Image (cartoon, coloured by chain):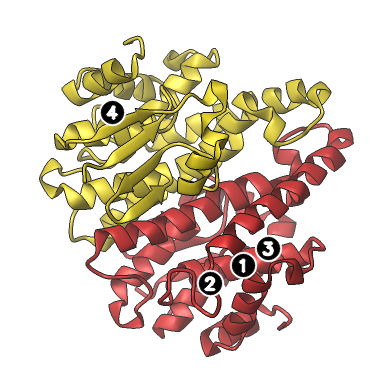
Chain colours: A red, B yellow
Amino acid sequence: MTPKLYYAPGTCALAPHICFEEAGAVVDYVRVDVGKGEHLQPDFLKLNPNGRVPLLTTEKGSLTEASAIMGWIARTWPDARLAPSGDPWAEAQVASFNSFLTSSVHAHTFASIFRPGRFSDDPALHPAIKAKGLATLKDQFAVIEDRLEPGAWVHGAYSTSDPYLLVMSRWAVRVGEDLTAWPRIAAHAERMLERPAVKAAFEAEGIVFG
Amino acid sequence: MTPKLYYAPGTCALAPHICFEEAGAVVDYVRVDVGKGEHLQPDFLKLNPNGRVPLLTTEKGSLTEASAIMGWIARTWPDARLAPSGDPWAEAQVASFNSFLTSSVHAHTFASIFRPGRFSDDPALHPAIKAKGLATLKDQFAVIEDRLEPGAWVHGAYSTSDPYLLVMSRWAVRVGEDLTAWPRIAAHAERMLERPAVKAAFEAEGIVFG
């Protein structure tokens, strides 16, 4: 059975999508229309009770969470060299960075900006929650900027952390940030956008390039 | 150099602490007084610019994020059998569950309850943010309850997901939830509390057992 990646364009599903492209994997990409609430329909909830993309299905079942899907891609297509192999400390550093993006940057900060309704049912409170998210974003991007080495990928060699960081830096632009405040993150995004795998994933999801 | 685990009692650092006890590892446990703001002092921020526990230091440097530290423990002490070894799909399922706890349950929900100041600077908004967190907690625990098999560990065999789930179920009790609403989660916590490694970690952190 060909693996199926359920995605919505420009969401964090873009990160495993890029990893599949890097690996040259044959994958069926299934677009989920979040605007129409397809992620909350019974058929989808049967596959992922959390009602979120990305979702991967294979003959073995369902796999959720962007970082876990990317980890599986890295292990299953080792020739793509998406993870440091055989060194538990180096592997843990990739897991650590991806966990920071998943939890602090996505579930906390970007969710506050994109989905303040997750934090209060009262729309009157949403502007304050969004504003706090935008302030936290600057703090978190400053931490990421400090740890990046100029001209290198996040962990030196290319890894799953790089497509994941690209998704976050694109989101920062989308919410009005100017990446020039973080020159290493800006340069990282530019180098990413030159990669054929990134161009292919953007084109497949219908994301305007740049 | 003996690994050092920087922790604050009862935080998510308890999960890697239990894993170290399961492995019988020799570790220096360094208590960080979060109440006194020790996690925001320059010496600590040099080791973890995010100002969070858990933090692991070894002769190789710093490692942050509970799930990444647990992954490293599982790889470094394979005899403790804290992870399914050699099967990328099974390993990814552990990573997926831990990522869900890190992002959705901790960074989103419990942070809303314990640290509403992360989502708004205005204390007048905190009760609404906490209330939304408590409602979301019920939804997320229902999803976890559904996926647990009665009498089994989270993934069948014991793994890093089990201490991590125990930390979340203890937090649920701490915020006033009655675990009997989720009998499989309640039974999981009871089985966990019988393990010598769990008792040892609780005692070392000075957590009242039960």
Instruction: Name which residue type carries label 4.
Output: Pro
Tags 2 and 3 touching, CB below 8 Å:
no
Q: Is residue B132 visible?
A: no
Distance (Cα) linking label 4 and label 2: 38 Å
Percent of width and height locating residue A186: 67, 74
Distance (Cα) linking label 1 and label 2: 6 Å
Percent of width and height locating residue B61: 35, 54
Choose mark 4 or mark 2, whichever is in front.
2
Q: Count residues near mark 1 (Cα–Cα under 10 Å), then give few for <14, some for 14-19, many for 20+.
A: some
Tags 4 and 1 touching, CB below 8 Å:
no
Choose mark 3 or mark 1, whichever is in front.
1
Left or right: residue B162 versus residue A177 is left
Distance (Cα) linking label 2 and label 3: 22 Å
Q: In this figure, which residue is indicated by the disc labeled 2?
A: A163
Q: In this figure, which residue is indicated by the disc labeled 3?
A: A33
Percent of width and height locating residue B90: 27, 55
Seen from the viewer's position, the closer of residues A146 and B141 is A146
Instruction: Name which residue type carries label 3.
Output: Asp
Distance (Cα) linking label 3 and label 1: 19 Å
Q: Earlier in the sequence, mark 3 or mark 1?
A: 3
| Mark drawn on residue A13 | none
Seen from the viewer's position, the closer of residues A157 and A10 is A157
Residue depicted at 35% across the width and 65% down the height: A72
Is label 4 in a helix, a strand or a loop? loop
- The residue marked by circle 2 belongs to what chain? A
Q: In this figure, which residue is indicated by the disc labeled 1?
A: A167
Q: In this figure, which residue is indicated by the disc labeled 4?
A: B150
